[in-house]
Image: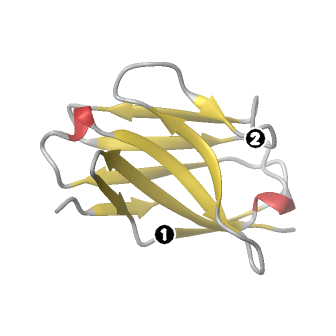
Amino acid sequence: QVQLVESGGDLVQPGGSLRLSCAASETIFSFYAMAWYRQAPGKERELVASIPSDGPTYYASSVKGRFTISRDNVKNTMYLQMNSLRPEDTAVYYCYAYLPPHNYWGQGTRVTVSS
């Protein structure tokens, strides 16, 4: 059972930056494909960015050029650097880990972009 713990969510002004972290309990973290999802109020959960164990990263068109996903396999941690934040980025951000046949979700961290 992998436990994922997100942190870094906060209230930030438009144009500001935040870095989210996702700490995994699993020592074989490096084998997992990882991703960030978000869910805005009244909307479905959507994929923001993903990073496989080995391969290219993926970004949703709405965040490409503003967000950067990365991982540190020594620290068992994934990050999401978010720059040029917009009000429409307001959501609960979830960490996701996938290694067939298993998948795990974190509890979420709230990001609010507002002046």
Residue sitting at x 75%, y 41%: 63
- Residue of label 1: 108
Q: Quadrant of the C terminus?
A: bottom right
Crowding at mark 2 (Cα within 10 Å: few <14, some 14-19, many 20+): some
14 versus 114 height, above or below: above
Question: Which x, y percent locates residue 92?
Answer: 61, 69
Q: Which residue occupies the extreme top position in the image?
A: 55
Q: Which residue occupies the extreme bottom position in the image?
A: 42
Question: Which x, y percent locates residue 53?
Answer: 34, 28
Crowding at mark 1 (Cα within 10 Å: few <14, some 14-19, many 20+): many
Q: Is residue 49 visible?
A: yes
Question: Which x, y percent locates residue 71?
Answer: 38, 33
Residue 38 found in image quarter: bottom right
Q: Which residue occupies the extreme front position in the image?
A: 101
The amino acid pointed to by label 1 is Gly
Frontmost residue, 115 versus 61: 61
Element assignment for label 1: loop
Residue sitting at x 76%, y 73%: 43
Q: Which residue occupies the extreme left position in the image?
A: 27
The answer to whether residue 47 is left or right of residue 51 is: right
- Residue of label 2: 63
The amino acid pointed to by label 2 is Val
Frontmost residue, 59 versus 100: 100
Element assignment for label 2: loop
Residue sitting at x 26%, y 52%: 24
Residue 72 found in image quarter: top left
